[in-house]
Amino acid sequence: MVLLKNEEALAKTAINTWKLVIGRLDRKLEQLTDDDIQKQIAPGKNRPFYILGHLTAIHDRLFSLLNLGERLHPDLDDVYIASPDRSFKDAVSASDLRKIWTEVNTRLTTAFEGFTSEDWLQKHAEVSDDDFAKDPNRNRFAVVLNRTSHASYHLGQLVLTK
Amino acid sequence: MVLLKNEEALAKTAINTWKLVIGRLDRKLEQLTDDDIQKQIAPGKNRPFYILGHLTAIHDRLFSLLNLGERLHPDLDDVYIASPDRSFKDAVSASDLRKIWTEVNTRLTTAFEGFTSEDWLQKHAEVSDDDFAKDPNRNRFAVVLNRTSHASYHLGQLVLTK
């Protein structure tokens, strides 16, 4: 067994929670057919397709927000972040969206696993140096913990489908 | 500004995320009247009252799971953990449940804020020494990150009510 420093152990635990939630979403999405994800989770509420597009777009934004390089699919934002469900025709097919979802999460997880504690505590891209000096909690670790909770929030909705 | 060690900064960020999610739940629950929380979030699904009872019972269990002393309300488990919604008459009134929810979270948050990094990385109460040696990720930090995601999962359902 490799002995980790406390700060490494804490960061590893957070990555495990991220992977756990993504894994649960993956399993739920596998249970739903491409037809199922077109059906609203409850009358008047979002389709699973929209929720998946939304989560994929929000996760794809993490590449720029965490200074990990260019994001892969900025084209998703208009339809799945800026607008409510059914404002537009879907921007991608269900099978392409499933692939993009997996691709984005796989790349993010690989990046997270390479972070040192110092990397985790760097500011994210949307906070100024001054604001970060006042509130050092606006770091990459906070962003990933928040996105893990956000993913879980929508998982709670997806499980209502069937 | 107090300079924190990396491990302290990571733990503080996780506590902030816990407080953020609990704060969002609190605000959502304030918007819902005692009548509102009796109405199923969608046809055939749980009532917000049940979800609140469930979250309160799960959080109350953290006192024993994290070795913080006796739990406060073990009487909630039969109705809100062991059984699906509407199996039993509610175990408490809406106003009492709201008070217990706040009391449990306030005490937990105070305990979390007193934890050192070593405290966070202690094993939780339901894993044996042997299993913990094999998987040191089964620590208090993992439990609280998971419960934060769990709370967020049910928040995602509560927002469907109105």
Image (tube, coloured by chain):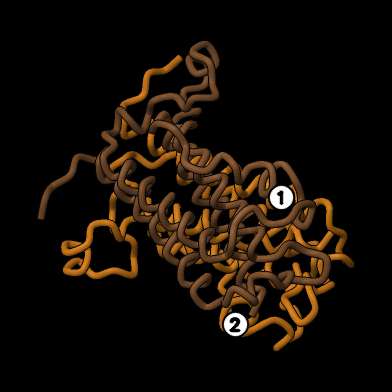
Chain colours: A brown, B orange
Residue drawn 73% across the image and 62% down it: A46
- Residue A154 sits in quarter: bottom right
The structure residue drawn at horizontal position 69% and vertical position 48%, both measured from the top left corner, is A79
Residue B102: x and y in percent read 67, 53
Question: Residues under labels 1 and 2: Cα distance?
Answer: 24 Å
Give the vertical position of B143 relative to A127 (above or below). Answer: below
Position of residue B95 in the picture relative to residue A147 (left or right): right
Q: Secondary structure at mark 1?
A: helix
Q: How many marks?
A: 2
Q: Which residue is mark 2?
A: B78
Chain at tag 1? B
Estimate how packed mark 2 is, as few (under 14), some (14 to 19) or many (20 or more) residues with alpha carbons within 10 Å: some
Is residue A70 depicted above or below B144 in this figure?
A: above
Tag 1: amino acid: Asp
Q: Position of residue B66 (x, y in %)?
A: 40, 58
Percent position (x, y) of residue B130? 16, 69
In front of the other: B67 or B1: B1
Q: Which numbered circle lies on residue B119?
A: none
Where's residue B119, x and y in %? 32, 46
Vertical arrangement, residue A51 with respect to residue A116, above or below: below
Give the label on residue B26, or none.
Answer: 1
Is B110 or A135 nearer to us in this picture?
Answer: A135
> Is A120 situated left or right of A134 in this image?
left
Residue B7 horizontal side relative to residue A135, left or right: left
Precedes in sequence: disc 1 or disc 2: 1
Query: Which residue sits at x=47%, y=27%?
Result: A124
Residue B75 visible from this viewpoint: no
Identity of the amino acid at label 2?
Asp
Residue A88 position (above or below residue A23): above
Element on which disc 2 rests? helix
